[in-house]
Amino acid sequence: MKQGRLFVISGPSGAGKGTICKALIESGAADLSVSMTTRKPRGIEQEGIHYYFVSHEDFQKAIDEGNMLEWAEIYGNRYGTPKKPVLEKLARGHDVILEIEMQGAMQVKESYPKSVLIFVLPPSISELRKRLIARGTETPEQIDLRTRTTLDEIKRIKDYSYFIVNDDLSSAVEDARIIMSAEHLRVEDQAEEIINRYESEVE
Amino acid sequence: MKQGRLFVISGPSGAGKGTICKALIESGAADLSVSMTTRKPRGIEQEGIHYYFVSHEDFQKAIDEGNMLEWAEIYGNRYGTPKKPVLEKLARGHDVILEIEMQGAMQVKESYPKSVLIFVLPPSISELRKRLIARGTETPEQIDLRTRTTLDEIKRIKDYSYFIVNDDLSSAVEDARIIMSAEHLRVEDQAEEIINRYESEVE
């Protein structure tokens, strides 16, 4: 059976990777992975849908047993991607999308080398600044710092296989779909399976 | 300026690579490369459109000077792809498609390592046999031999980056277009150019 592929969508914050992922998931192009966290559920959040809610002990156990694709600690709580549900989806032939920060993306590349890393770029630095100002959550000084950080982050594009410039959302989503389709047409680890298919017909 | 890419469409004969290429060229997805040959023009064939017609001496000179992407001798005449017109098209930002036999494909990979090799597969061996029988140019014995050769050729798919199963022409052409679009979204040798673009904006 056709194996699904794991796509990691990452890039500087503010480039719009979340919006692209949301559109891809909603269109049915791929399954979203559910994160695991040690923080308590809020409001309508449901176990297994918004997060897997676990204790600090269970989270640590998952790390120790190599069951996390990536994880990070933010303000004393841990967040990460458990390996098992992702591998199960891939085995069922579903593509899976992970939307994560750049450090997490590097962890996934290490823990699952067959993952395909996609870098989402803002159309320009000035456009990124505009978006951050519109968002209104940061001071001008923070935005200046962010601009410089973004440039440093863009230099790490070399660790990624593909890039998408998020100028117009619908063409960015279309680019993501093209990348996902093309990856299924790559020979790489499918070579043996292809050869066997034709050989079995003749024997 | 955006650089074009060289796509090599190859695979076992009878898989339909010619039809796929024709459709891609006609839709304007890419430029066709014009072959060079030592044989004489036939009928309406025009210089620079159907072939570049040259003498044996000039063909040998092109080989000696490293100006051929690939070439082969068939029944005493030489056929091949001159490098210069292809590189000129790529420099103008046009993608170029080469439809060639598998030996030629390996030569192109060596003479232009940035080329993208696509392997066209028949839907099945039995379907390939049907197509060869319908074509009516070969004896049953020749068709049996061809079937075994095809299997050997399919084993060389590992040398290729992508594969297309030519079951239905329009989806095969669509697959080719997806591959071509995705290749322009690959980071690889575009990384420096991308980084420079964002850096230049801030300086």
Image (cartoon, coloured by chain):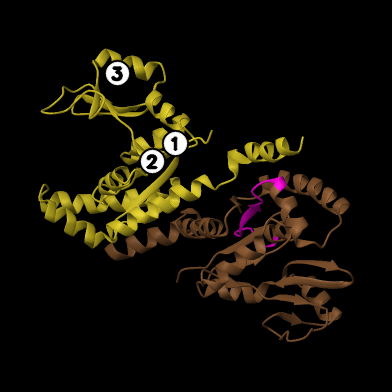
Chain colours: A brown, B yellow
Q: Is residue A114 magenta?
A: yes
Q: Which residue is mark 2?
A: B8
Residue B178 x/y as whole percent: 43, 53
Other-residue count near label 1 (Cα within 10 Å), few / some / many at <14 / 14–19 / ≥20: some
Q: Secondary structure at mark 1?
A: helix
Query: Magenta stretch?
Result: A111-126
Q: Assess whether mark 2 and mark 1 are in contact (beta carbons under 8 angstroms).
A: yes
Residue A82 position, x and y percent, is: 70, 73
Query: Which chain does tag 3 point to?
Result: B
Badge 2: chain ID:
B
Q: Residue at x 50, y 36 (%)?
A: B114
Q: From the viewer's perspective, is A120 left or right of B144?
A: right
Where does the N terminus of chain B fall, quadrant-wise? Answer: top right
Crowding at label 2, few (<14), some or many (≥20) Cα neighbours within 10 Å?
A: many
Mark 1 vs mark 2: in front:
2
Measure the alpha-carbon separation of dots 2 and 3. Answer: 22 Å
Of mark 1 and mark 2, the one earlier in the sequence is 2
What residue did someone put label 3 on?
B59
**Residue at screen point 37% across, 44% down:** B29
Q: Residue B109: which numbered mark, if any?
A: 1
Answer whether residue A203 is visible to the viewer in this image.
Answer: no
Instruction: Identify the image quadrant of the C terminus of chain B.
Output: top right
